[in-house]
Image: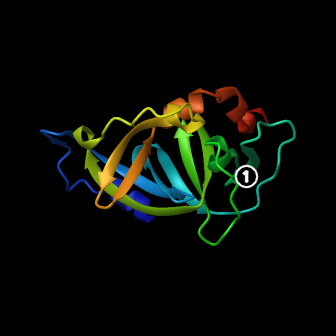
Amino acid sequence: MSELATIKESGNLPTESKKGELLQYLTFKLLDETYGINVMQIKEVLRYSEIAPVPGAQSYVLGIVNLRGNVVTVIDTRVRFSLPECTISDDTRIIIIEHDGEQIGMLVDAVKEVFYLYQGEIEQSPSVGNDEALMFIQGVYQKEEELVILLDLNKMIDSDNEQLAIGSMI
């Protein structure tokens, strides 16, 4: 059983407090920034493998992969957030998320850890500029000495759902 599945299934922590619901987030790196995704939206984390390009797709759509017989669209999260493209390394991962019954892969520089926080600990993200990534930010969380940018995957996927549905068209 994977570490992510073990964490999801462990029910030994309280789920409510005065600070709200207890949530789990998986953190990953893009450049020098740390981002977080709610664990409940993640299906699995894969090592990087070859991605078949799809002609005519959006610039941030890398292509598709075959995941146990299912075609999964993979996006370059850096490009989606208007960051420079990454070079593939041993730490590069594809985070498989599920949204409305569709699986989508997110290419990230590295996956770090899973941590817990209460809903009430999420701070409002500052509105600076009109950066593409800002519309996908749910909030921020100060985790020890590190600021974690928490993503709202529903907004990220729904904003371009037609372009991300490549896998379902093939």
Quadrant of the snapshot with the C terminus: top right
Q: Is residue 117 left or right of residue 51?
A: left
Query: In this rendering, is residue 127 above or below 28?
Result: above
Residue at horizontal 25 percent and vertical 43 percent from the top? 121
Q: Quadrant of residue 118?
A: top left
Query: In this rendering, is residue 36 above or below 125?
Result: below
Residue at horizontal 55 percent and vertical 30 percent from the top? 130
Q: Is residue 10 left or right of residue 32?
A: left
Visible in this render: residue 38? no
Front-most of 142 and 17? 142
Across and down, in percent, residue 44 comes to 52, 55
Across and down, in percent, residue 109 comes to 59, 61
Across and down, in percent, residue 42 comes to 48, 48
Q: Is residue 61 left or right of residue 53?
A: left
Query: In this rendering, is residue 132 above or below 26?
Result: above
Q: How many marks?
A: 1
Front-most of 108 and 3? 108
Residue that mark 1 sits on: 65
Query: How many neighbours does mark 1 have within 10 angstroms: few (below 14), some (14-19), or many (20 or more)?
Result: many
Residue at horizontal 57 percent and vertical 35 percent from the top? 131
| Name of the residue lying farthest toward the front | 129
Visible in this render: residue 93? yes
Quadrant of the snapshot with the N terminus: bottom left
Disc 1 element? strand
| Name of the residue lying farthest toward the left | 18
Query: In this rendering, is residue 1 above or below 70?
Result: below
Across and down, in percent, residue 19 comes to 17, 40
Residue at horizontal 58 percent and vertical 27 percent from the top? 158
Residue type, mark 1 in image:
Val
